[in-house]
Structure formats: structure tokens, C-alpha cells
Image (cartoon, rainbow, N blue to C red):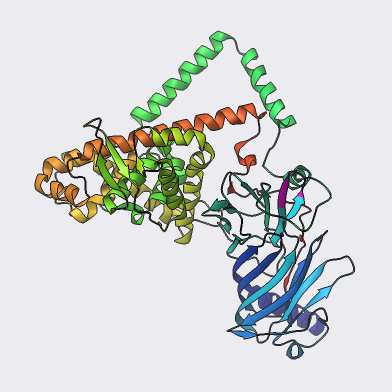
């Protein structure tokens, strides 16, 4: 009995000890050279409670090779033992040392001594030769940057691929990206490929990335015995990316056709009428306009005076896009809201149109860098569309959006991703990733704020609105599609102050109504053109889904098998 009690106590103690193991953050920078070689630097922020060493396994390397491991902590370099690492040593004989284990199957393990138990921040670097390979008509990268099965699931992971090839800048047009096996996002932004987790990893989560480069961006020294399509097919197996029409797609279509044939025309008329009556009753009588999962309720009737969501446009767009019960798309107002903010912030200048008095142009002569990567990318798009004179004139961005439809049509999805991250960073989401009660309350404030703006002139308690808040009020009003209405109400109620406000924004002889109308029209037309062009290309390509085109977005929860370097496990041992 005593032995059994001792055994149970030992197991309990071991479990408690291991439960304290933590990997808070993995920040990984991958610098790619023209020959396909990568210099990888990782920063591991961890808490260690057991074991003598930390290790990272890599298998299925194929023609790749990994070497030149170095590790440092607090600016102190570890002594490198090269390929002579001995795992069967006590902790003290591994302290301050690192090395590589070469396995019989061709894989490697990068190892270093953990030192004392507790918190550590290690900087780990190594070189991967052949990370980018020749793959037929393209050059490609397919690699697991973070393995599943680590000693503790990471809470946050970020991987950045940096272009140091000396060649052309990476763009949405010449680089395609996909990600697998975690709740993460991946995009090409400002010439960099960025992948970042949106939620803590699970036990089997990984950061597996597939990238396709157009020829001319690299001159890889390593050639893969196959083409990119073979690697892509291997990666897509079991994922929710789709490259071609599948049996499931065909079956869904057949079932839909059978349903149409089964019901008679009269049956469809009756069902359609009943459905419309249901929609009308719930919408107009009950006021059910909103998704309960986002707002916590279907009907929101109150007012909220303060700028909601800390003035974050991404969070507001995510809320509106996800929260409308009838699926209304707010993307048509997204670009207009940013246009308005740029004008009010002085990022761009307003110029009267010499041909028409009711039309305005925007000058992008002063190049700016905006902090938010999605907003900054939009700014670069519009500046590019403005032509050699850097003045955006009537129809220019709308035409440009047809030609560069991939970049424009990808904006809403990227903005939703940023918006969700805003909620997650403030712990407004639960374990499942859905908004918790506090998050739903924040979301409701957005609709209550919209109600307040729409009923502004009716409110006996509206009071004086500080001019410093007008900028955020009008930007959010543009996202709601009511900026012109709100501006007119401000002008009627505060004529002197509003005139001073518009003059300070550099509107000059241009009315705010003209500016607002122009911004909204450009926004709606550009989005409409981009999505129409996207739909045309999707249908002409044989039914391939947009996500499979490599435009970036959320990772696939499945797929990503047989990646180069892919293994299982790692961490303390």
C-alpha cells in the first residue's frame, strides 16, 4: 500500500511539474538568399521546469541540409560543439553549450543546454540550404517552421520570410502563399511573407507553410525531383484548400439539382412566400437584425455616445461583416472610410476637379508609411493607381481595381483577420475563438453608436460633441455608409465649428458632402469591380476556389503533410 501511495504521489508530482512548462512565444525570421539558402533566427520565450536540454527535430529533409547552429541568451553566446552533441549528459555539462545530432534517417536535432529551471529567452539561429528549390515552372518552399507535439503548445507564433535575394520585390502577383495545421493567417505584405497565429496552439498544431515563387525571383542551387504542382497536391491532401472540382463539389451540385426537380413550381412558390413572410416578421416586427453569436442578442436598440472599439476600423469591420443576420456586406464602405481618415489626418490632400465643380481629386504626392499593414497596403495600391502625377482622378482607382483585382478583393478578408486579432489581444474571445460576454458587449457598442449617429438630431440628450471626436465619428459613419448624413447634421448644429474643422482638414472650397460622396462611390465601385473580376477568373479556371489561389488568408486546419523538415515533438527533454 505504501509503495502504491508513493507511486501515485510521484506520478502526481511529475504531472504537476510538467504542467508548469510553457512556451509563450516563438518569433522566427527567415532571411532568404538568391540561391534558396535561408538564415533562420528564432527567439524562444519559455518557462522550463524539467529536463536537461531543449531540442528541435527535423525529418524528411530530402535535398535540404541544416547546419551552423548558434544559441545565445542575454547576449552571451553558447559554446558550439558542432555535430558532436551528446544527449546522455547531466544538465551541468550541457549548460551554455549547443550542438547538432545527425540521425541515421537523415534527419537532424538542434540541441542546447537549458541551464537552470525557470524563464528563458533564447535566440537560436541556423542555416537551411535548399529551403527554396527549383520545382519545374516555379520555385517553391514547403517547410514546417514549428512542429506539432512540442513539450508545451506555443501561445503565440510568428514567422516572417525576408527577401534578401537582391531581386524584385515580392508581391501578391509573383508570390503565392498557403498555411496549414493551426489557427493562423498568412499574407504577402510590404514585400515580406508573414504568418502569425491567431490563437494559442493545440497539441497537434503546427506552422507549416507552402510558398510558390515565380521564376526570376530566385536562382536556387537545389533542384527538387518533381514540379510544384506535385508538392502542392501533397500539401493540399486533407486540407480545405481546393484546386480543382472535386467529387464532393459534383455531389453537392447533383443534390441541389435533384431538390429543384423534386419540388414543383407551385411548391417553390409556397416555400418562397413562407420564407419571405418569416424574414419580414422577424426583421420588421421582432427587429432581429443581428447575429447573436457576435452581439449576444438579435435586437439592439440603445445608444452609445463614445467612439466604440477604441476607434479601431479593423475591429469595426470584422464586427459588421460577421454580425449582420442577413449577411449584408460592409466591404463597399471600407475603402471610403480609410479615404476619409487619410484626408482628415492630412495623409492626402484634397484638390478640386478642374472639369467638374461637384467632384474632387486626391493628391498622394507626399509618400506616407501607415502603421497598420492592411491600411498601408491599401494606401500603396491607391497611390499606384493615381499614376505618374500622383493625383487620384475620377475613375482611376476603379479601373485599376479590375486589373489588380486580387489585391483589392483580398482586403476585406485581411481586415476581418486583423479585426478578430484586436478582440483576441484584449481577451474578448473564449477558448473556442468566439466572442465572450465582454467581447459581445464591446460589439454591441458599435451598433449602439450607429443608432446614436442615425438618431443624432432626434436625441434630446446629444449634448455638445467635442470637435476632437468628429474625425472618428465621421470615419465610423463612413464605414456605416452614413457619413454624408452625419456631416450635414454636424454642419447644421455647429456651423462655425464645422467650418473650422473642414478648413483645418484642408478641404478649402470643397464641401464635405462632395468628399464623402466621392469616397463612398470609389469604395463601392472598386470593390464591385474587383469581386466581379475575381468571380470571372474563378469560373474560367475550372471552379478552383479563391482560397486555393494563394492570395493569403487563414491557414487550413488540415493538410500540410509530408513537408520538408516536418517532424513531431521537440522542446524540453
Is residue 40 at all visible to an observer of this figure? Answer: yes
Residue 544 percent location from the top left of the image? 66, 33
| Left or right: where 154 falls relative to 453 | right
Residue 177 or residue 350, whichever sits in front: 350
**Residue found at x 67% / y 79%:** 71
| Quadrant of res 355 | top left
Dividing the image into 4 quarters, which one contains the N terminus? bottom right
Residue lying at the far front of the rendered structure: 388
In-front residue for pair 232/89: 232
Q: Where is 304 relative to 26, above or below?
A: above
User: Would residue 51 be visible to someone looking at this image?
Assistant: no
Question: Magenta region, mostly helix, strand or loop?
Answer: strand
x and y percentages locating residue 45 in the rendered image: 59, 74
Q: Is residue 393 left or right of residue 484?
A: right
Give above or below for 421 relative to 295: below
Q: Percent position (x, y) of residue 42?
A: 63, 70
Q: Is 514 drawn above or below residue 108 in the view shown?
A: above
Range covered by the magenta-colored residues: 135-140
| Residue shown at the point (58%, 84%) measured from the top left | 74
Amino acid at each position: 500500500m505504501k509503495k502504491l501511495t508513493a507511486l501515485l504521489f510521484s506520478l502526481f508530482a511529475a504531472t504537476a511539474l510538467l504542467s508548469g512548462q510553457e512556451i509563450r512565444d516563438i518569433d522566427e525570421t527567415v532571411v532568404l538568399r538568391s540561391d534558396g539558402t535561408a538564415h533562420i533566427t528564432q527567439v524562444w520565450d519559455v518557462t522550463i521546469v524539467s529536463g536537461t536540454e531543449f531540442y528541435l527535430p527535423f525529418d524528411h529533409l530530402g535535398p535540404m541540409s541544416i547546419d551552423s547552429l548558434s544559441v545565445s541568451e542575454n547576449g552571451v553566446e553558447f559554446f558550439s560543439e558542432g555535430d558532436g552533441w551528446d544527449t546522455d549528459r547531466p544538465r551541468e555539462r550541457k549548460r551554455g553549450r549547443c550542438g547538432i545530432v545527425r540521425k541515421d534517417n537523415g534527419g537532424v536535432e538542434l540541441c542546447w543546454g537549458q541551464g537552470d529551471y525557470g524563464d528563458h529567452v533564447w535566440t537560436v539561429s541556423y542555416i537551411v540550404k535548399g529551403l527554396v528549390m527549383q520545382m519545374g515552372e516555379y520555385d517553391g518552399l514547403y517547410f514546417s517552421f514549428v512542429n506539432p507535439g512540442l513539450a508545451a503548445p506555443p501561445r503565440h507564433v510568428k514567422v516572417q520570410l525576408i527577401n534578401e535575394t537582391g531581386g524584385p520585390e515580392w508581391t501578391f502577383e509573383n508570390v503565392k502563399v498557403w498555411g496549414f495545421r493551426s489557427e493562423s493567417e498568412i499574407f504577402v505584405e510590404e514585400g515580406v511573407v508573414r504568418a502569425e497565429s491567431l490563437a494559442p496552439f493545440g497539441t497537434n498544431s503546427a506552422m507549416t507553410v507552402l510558398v510558390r515563387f515565380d521564376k526570376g525571383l530566385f536562382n536556387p542551387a537545389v533542384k527538387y525531383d518533381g514540379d510544384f504542382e506535385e508538392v502542392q497536391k501533397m500539401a493540399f491532401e486533407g486540407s480545405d484548400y481546393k484546386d480543382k472540382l472535386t467529387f464532393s463539389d459534383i455531389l453537392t451540385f447533383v443534390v441541389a439539382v435533384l431538390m429543384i426537380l423534386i419540388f414543383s413550381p407551385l411548391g417553390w412558390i409556397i416555400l418562397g412566400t413562407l420564407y419571405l413572410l418569416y424574414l419580414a416578421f422577424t426583421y420588421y416586427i421582432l427587429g432581429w437584425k443581428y447575429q447573436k453569436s457576435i452581439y449576444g442578442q438579435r435586437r439592439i436598440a440603445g445608444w452609445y455616445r463614445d467612439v466604440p472599439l477604441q476607434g479601431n476600423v479593423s475591429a469595426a469591420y470584422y464586427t459588421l461583416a460577421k454580425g449582420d443576420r442577413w449577411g449584408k456586406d460592409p466591404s463597399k464602405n471600407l475603402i471610403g472610410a480609410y479615404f476619409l481618415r487619410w484626408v482628415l489626418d492630412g495623409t492626402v490632400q484634397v484638390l478640386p476637379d478642374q472639369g467638374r465643380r461637384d467632384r474632387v481629386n486626391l493628391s498622394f504626392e507626399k509618400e506616407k508609411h501607415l502603421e497598420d499593414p492592411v491600411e498601408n497596403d491599401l494606401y500603396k495600391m491607391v497611390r499606384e493607381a493615381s499614376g505618374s502625377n500622383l493625383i487620384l482622378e475620377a475613375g482611376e482607382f476603379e479601373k485599376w481595381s479590375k486589373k489588380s483585382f486580387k489585391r483589392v478583393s483580398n482586403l476585406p478578408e485581411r481586415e476581418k483577420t486583423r479585426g478578430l486579432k484586436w478582440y483576441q489581444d484584449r481577451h474578448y474571445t473564449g477558448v473556442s475563438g468566439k466572442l465572450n460576454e465582454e467581447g459581445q458587449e464591446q460589439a454591441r457598442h458599435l451598433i449602439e453608436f450607429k443608432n446614436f449617429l442615425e438618431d443624432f438630431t432626434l436625441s434630446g440628450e446629444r449634448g455638445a460633441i467635442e470637435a476632437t471626436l468628429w474625425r472618428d465619428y465621421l470615419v465610423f459613419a463612413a464605414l456605416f455608409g452614413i457619413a454624408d448624413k452625419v456631416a450635414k447634421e454636424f454642419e447644421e448644429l455647429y456651423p462655425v465649428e464645422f467650418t473650422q474643422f473642414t478648413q483645418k482638414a484642408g478641404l478649402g472650397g470643397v464641401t464635405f458632402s462632395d468628399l464623402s460622396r466621392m469616397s463612398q462611390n470609389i469604395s463601392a465601385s472598386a470593390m464591385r469591380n474587383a469581386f466581379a473580376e475575381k468571380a470571372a477568373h474563378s469560373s474560367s479556371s475550372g471552379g478552383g476556389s479563391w482560397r486555393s489561389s494563394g492570395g493569403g488568408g487563414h491557414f487550413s486546419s488540415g493538410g500540410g503533410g509530408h513537408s520538408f523538415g516536418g517532424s513531431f515533438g521537440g522542446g524540453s527533454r
